[in-house]
Image: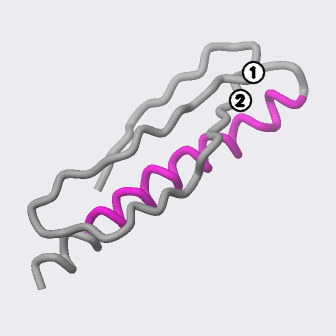
Amino acid sequence: MNKQRTVFAAALALILVIGFFGAAQGQTAAKGAAGKGPVAVVAVKTVQLGEVTEGQDFGYTFKVKNAGNAELQIINVRPG
C-alpha cells in the first residue's frame, strides 16, 4: 500500500509540474505570438517512469526553453 502512495504522489507531482508549465505557456503564447513577451516551450510534457519500487529514488528533469523575446520568469512553483 505504501508503494501505491509513493507512485500516486510522484504522479501527482508530475501532473502539477506539467500543468504549471502548460499554464505558463498558454498565458505567454499570445504575447509571444505578437512578438512581445516570453514564450515557455516544454519539449517533453509527459514521462513514463515505469515501475517504481518502495524506497527507490526517481526523477526527471524537464527542459524549458524561452522562445520569446523577453525574460521568462518561472515563479511560485509548488511541486507535490
What's the amino acid at mark 2? Val
The residue under the point 47% across, 62% down is 48
What's the amino acid at mark 1? Gly
Task: Tell whether position 5 is magenta.
Answer: no
Q: Is residue 17 left or right of residue 30?
A: left
User: Magenta part of the protein: which range?
Assistant: 9-33
The residue under the point 61% across, 49% down is 22
How far is the residue under mark 1 from the one under mark 2?
5 Å
Task: Tell whether position 20 is magenta.
Answer: yes
- Name the residue beneath numbered marker 1: 68
Q: Secondary structure at mark 1?
A: loop
Q: Is residue 48 left or right of residue 35?
A: left
Q: Which of the labelled discs sits on residue 19, or is there none?
A: none
Are there few (<14), some (14-19), or many (20+) residues within 10 Å of tag 2? Answer: many
Work out whether 15 lies above or below 76: below
Work out whether 37 lies above or below 42: above
How many marks on residues? 2
Q: Which of the labelled discs sits on residue 39, or is there none?
A: 2
The residue under the point 76% across, 14% down is 69
Q: Position of residue 21 (x, y in %)?
A: 55, 44
The residue under the point 16% across, 76% down is 3
Q: Position of residue 47 (x, y in %)?
A: 49, 57
Work out whether 4 lies above or below 32: below
**Circle nearer the N terminus (1, 2):** 2
Q: Position of residue 40 (x, y in %)?
A: 65, 32
Mark 1–mark 2 contact, CB under 8 Å?
yes
Are there few (<14), some (14-19), or many (20+) residues within 10 Å of tag 1? Answer: many
Q: Secondary structure at mark 2?
A: loop
